[in-house]
Image (cartoon, rainbow, N blue to C red):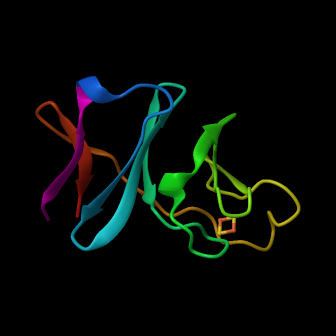
């Protein structure tokens, strides 16, 4: 297992959203409400990159078709909530003053 850095801790703020690649996986580091998340940088709806989205009311909203995915549960909001897969989360990892994932 190896650590893959996405950002320095001092760079983080609510609304932070940065794509990065770890061991060939396209991921996204986000912060909202003081919580940080690492999710797959792929919308469960039709695979658009979520890095182009925006964070609104605790959800990452995909720019392609406007579906929001809750950052705590991973579930889609709205009428497709029961039909779409959830966001795929990865555990956040730290090394020194860096934040990222261990994969
Ligand atoms: S691809 Fe993301 S909402 Fe459709």
Q: Is residue 8 magenta?
A: yes
x%, y% of residue 56?
A: 67, 37
Pinpoint residue 7: horizontal percent, then vertical percent: 24, 39
Q: Quadrant of the C terminus?
A: bottom left
Label the magenta part by its dominant secondary structure. strand
From the viewer's perspective, tell me whether residue 71 is left or right of residue 16: right
> Where 77 sits versus 30, above or below?
below
Q: Is residue 31 above or below residue 45?
A: above
At x 69% / y 57%, what residue is drawn?
A: 75
Query: Which part of the image, by quadrant, shows the N terminus?
Result: bottom left
Q: Residue at x 66, y 63 (%)?
A: 64
Please say if 9 is above or below 74. above
Give percent across and percent down for residue 48.
Answer: 56, 69
Residue depicted at x 72% and y 72%: 84
Is residue 82 left or right of 72 when viewed as pictured? right
Q: Nearer the viewer, residue 88 or 49?
A: 49
User: Residue sitting at 58 percent across and 50 percent down?
Assistant: 53
Magenta residue check for 56: no
What's drawn in magenta, residue-wise? 1-9
Q: Residue 71: tell me if it is visible.
A: no
Question: Residue 80 at x, y = what percent?
Answer: 83, 67
Which of the 4 quarters of the picture holds residue 66? Answer: bottom right
Residue furthest to the right in view is: 79
């Amino acid at each position: 297992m190896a650590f893959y850095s996405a950002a320095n801790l001092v760079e983080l703020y609510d609304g932070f959203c940065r794509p990065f690649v770890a061991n060939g996986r396209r991921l996204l580091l986000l912060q909202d409400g003081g919580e940080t998340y690492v999710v797959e940088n792929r919308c469960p709806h039709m695979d658009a990159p979520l890095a182009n989205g925006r964070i609104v009311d605790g959800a990452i909203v995909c720019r392609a078709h406007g579906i929001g995915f809750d950052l705590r549960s991973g579930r889609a909001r709205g009428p497709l909530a029961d039909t779409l897969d959830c966001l795929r989360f990865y555990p956040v990892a730290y090394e020194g003053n860096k934040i990222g994932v261990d994969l």
